Image (spheres, helix red, strand yellow):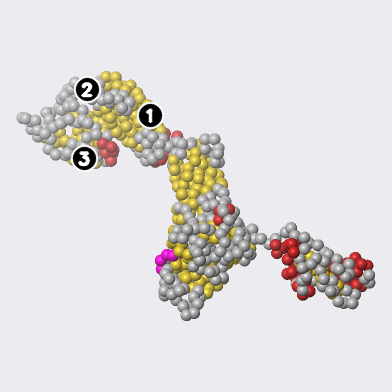
Amino acid sequence: MALLSPDRTPAFRLTPGPAGSTFVHGRGGAPARAGSVQPSRQATDRAGVCSAFRAARNGGDLSVRPVVRYPVITYVRSMRRSQLRTLVRAVVACLAVALCCLPAEASATPERATILSPADGSLTSSPLESPPHHTPFTGDWAVDIAGAVGRPVYARFANVSGSLALNVIGRFEPCASPNQGTAGIGLRVQVSVDGVALGVVNYVHLANARGNGPVGNGEQLGTMSSGTRTSCWTGAHVHMEPRNDSKYSCFQSTPLGAGLGGGSKLGVLGGEYAAAKNQLCPPGAVDAAAGTSPRGAYDEASSPGAGTVRVRGWTYDPDAPTSTGAIHVYVGGPAGSPGAEGHAFNADAVRADVAAAFPGVGDRHGLDVTFGTGKRGAQTVCAYAINIAAGGENVGLGCKTVTIDEPNPFGNFESADSPAGGQLHVSGWATDRNAFTQPLTMHVYIGGPAGTPDAEFRVLTAGRERRDVAAAVAGAGAAHGFDDILTTARRGSQAVCVYAINVGPGENIALGCKTVTIQDPPPPTADAGANDPAPAPSAAPPDPTASPVPATAPTTAPGSARRTLARTVRLARASCSRARLRLSGQNASIARATRLRRGRCRLTIVTTAPAGTRYDLLIRRSGNTVRRASAIGV
């Protein structure tokens, strides 16, 4: 920059000297320090002045030296007021030029993003080659990833320092004449973070390329093209070139021939880690870029069954958008709470709504899981989206309160007695919240608790109507009672133990044991009734778990005549069935059961037993258990 003397000739000028010093030249052009003369036109060059100020700021010597012929102070004193105003304006202009240059040095771009491999394949070319196979055409460095024709090519980035925006801004012919049109096309993708443009990444040798416009991180750009083998295309691959808008992009040291996938880090765009083309990133740069934390939502927490919790939600990590995420669930309080249960799950269920809301991430980011827990009552259930890529941190998705019921069955063993010799009567009720409205299976042990040697084992079903249970246990219904007569070979004082059998999560529960004295069956007595003659000695008690006796001709005792007779008894309509009824003992069977009105059932009995033989009428129930209905004489 030149300042004018009173006679309008340049009086002095500023020029950068060695080590950043600035010289003032007089009319004759002689500087105060030898060897530092600069042409006058350079002194007026804005870039030259900026360079001087930059150099001075970086530690150089920024000084104004008086001219040899006209010392500055003497000259200023001799100026008229109008000339002084001119000088002041010139100095202000000089300072403005210097100050305007300062931001150029301070304009480093902190925003950055790690560039991931755009395709699955192997690294066949990179700046590590000596000499490099590729000299970047428009980028800062270049790589080739070999694959197969038709293999998808994606825009992939990770460890983004803010909100990432990708935009396809154009396409171009990748091959020079005479090979034009032989190897697909190229796409130019602009990369911005938090509204700041980092630069452009070129993806070359594509087929089925998408058009201009926004593209999501991880979204497909096209496929590897086929081509004609020339110096431009030697096989299916994608050629990629990043270019920083400010300074240069750097590349990650990756061995040639290495296999690459969606998480392979190739370099950093933005951040200004390099000062020239084909420069390596500093150690840790691809990981040091501040990544974003995962996103997600906690949709539901409930207890669909006793002892269980169901959790629904979704998550994905913007640093690895197409990868399966993870959600950790804590029952009993937030993570770190004393006694809280921790459960880890992969978020890989299909969520089409997530795929629609975040293009390019895919739909495998959902969680819908039901799991068992030892917690009971009202519990705080908290969910966390787990960070899966470098940068970012785990994110709490929230907490919800869930009431978890006891999963084990429950009920009451109310009574046990022996109504007749060789018989045992048990009653009570039981239900399980995991099958709340369904009849429950019961196990009965005669002779001691389960596991006692020689204890008899019986199975029955708690399905009789108990309106008192329905009123006391909300939502259970009434079909949970048992009231059964079992036959047994045990005699004398016996421990009778009843167990409710668990359904779903939980375990079988003992309802208790009771002591019962079981006598021998009484001897037969005379009975003159036409339909109930004096009984004969009863046969041995049947096994209640055995199949019903078939309705075929009974076993005929030597010398006995076969007879057919009818008996009418009172039975529930559902029980009046030949398949469900049988007679105790031998030499008699039920050939037909006919339902009559008013709860009566007519039985056609075929027998060869002596007249007056007495039988128990047994009703077969579910689980091959039996109940005594009445006594019948033949």
Residue farthest to the bottom, as pictured = 178
Give the labeled residue for mark 2: 521
Pointer 1 local density, CA inside 10 Å: few below 14, some 14–19, many at least 20: some
Residue topped by disc 3: 578
179 horizontally vs 192: left or right? left
Q: Is residue 149 inside the magenta stretch?
A: yes
- Amino acid marked by disc 2: Pro
Where's the N terminus, which quadrant? bottom right
Mark 3: few/some/many CA within 10 Å (<14, 14-19, 20+):
many
Q: Residue at x 56, y 70 (%)?
A: 138
Between disc 3 and disc 1, the foreground one is: 1
SS under mark 3: loop
Amino acid residing under circle 3: Arg
**Which segment is the magenta one?**
145-150
Mark 3 or mark 2: which comes first in sequence? 2
Rendered position, 619 above or below 368: above
**Residue that mark 1 sits on:** 511
The type of residue carrying mark 1 is Leu
Q: Quadrant of residue 160?
A: bottom right
Please tell me whether mark 2 sits on a helix, a strand or a loop: loop
- Residue placed most toward the observer, 17 or 3: 17
- Callout 2 environment at 10 Å: few (<14), some (14 to 19), or many (20+)? some
Q: Is residue 466 among the parts visible in the rendering?
A: no
Quadrant of the rendering where the C terminus is positioned? top left
The residue at the point 13 percent across, 32 percent down is: 587
- Image position of 175 with respect to 475: above or below: below
SS of the residue under disc 1:
strand
Of the residues under marks 3 and 1, which one precedes in the sequence? 1
